[in-house]
Image: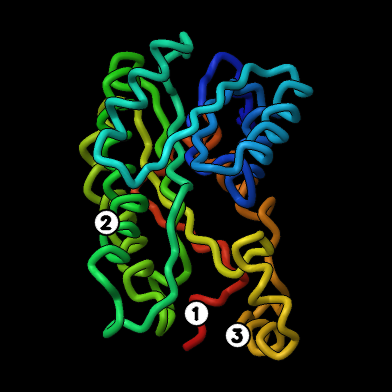
Amino acid sequence: MRNNYNLSGKTALITGGGQGIGKSIVLALAKAGADIIINFRSNTKLAEETAEEVKDLGRKIWLWPFDLSGEDVLENYQKFTKEKHCPPVDIFIANASHQIRNPWNKVTIDEFALQMNVNVRSTLLLMQGVVPHMKEKKWGRILNIGSVQEKRPHPDMCIYAASKGALSNLVINLAPQLAPFGITVNSLAPGVIATARNETALSDPEYLEKTVQKIPLGFIGDPDDCAQLALLLCSESGRYITGCNYFVDGGMSLIF
């Protein structure tokens, strides 16, 4: 039986990798032997703490501080990797996202643009940057981090849900195009996960109770629940999986 999670010799780029689900994925890949490039926007302290944990695992780490809402995402990434002498990326995980809670009829142009630019446009541009190397090596892994809201929308986050739906559509469009080059493209859609983003909402006992009632398994997920699936999809053990969207949500996407 093949069981190959060894990522030695691979380099992974994880956007938003300094905390939450991104951090758990970073550490899972690093434990498997991958060197890591972490993109983060502003929380230098958390990114540096994550970097130290990666170093403790004996892996190389590069920190790329950059706001993905800008138009020059690809140019900045290429400049950074050249200046820091980063190796080409074998694994790309589009984890960073921006979420704004607002009813659909109150969404501003700036709120719309910010969420779409960070969540979708930057993902496409970075794909354009990393795929040529993957094609050359005849091996690559691309993983988009979506959301349960693709299937179970939230009334105050319709643009966020739409942006995550766009990532899923990128997967099914690109997977067959890149498959002949040994590149898999998948999506992982978390449900309610105990991260800093959800901390305030979940600290309300009434909200927490209502939320848990919507989850068939009956509990809030942990970032590592996502990281373990990400490791499978980004390793050789996941070589025959492409064009898929996996909900890591305790069954929440099944309940309406």
Instruction: Say what amino acid the circle numbered 1 marks.
Output: Leu
**Disc 3 versus disc 1: distance between alpha carbons?**
9 Å
**Disc 2 versus disc 3: distance between alpha carbons?**
26 Å
Q: Which circle, 3 or 1, is nearer the viewer?
A: 3
Any part of residue 189 in sight: yes
Which residue is more in the foreground, 148 or 96?
Answer: 96
> N-terminal of the two: label 2 or label 3?
2
Q: Which residue is mark 2?
A: 169
**Disc 2 versus disc 1: distance between alpha carbons?**
20 Å
Q: Which mark is residue 220?
A: none
Q: Which residue is mark 3?
A: 214
Q: Which mark is residue 254?
A: 1
In which quarter of the view is residue 146 placed?
bottom left
Question: Residue 41, percent across and down?
Answer: 49, 42
Instruction: Say what amino acid the circle numbered 3 marks.
Output: Lys
Please give the name of the residue rendered at 72% of the width and 34% of the height, measured from the top-left corner: 49
Q: Secondary structure at mark 2?
A: helix
Relative to 94, say whether 3 is above or below: above
Which residue is more in the foreground, 78 or 250?
Answer: 78
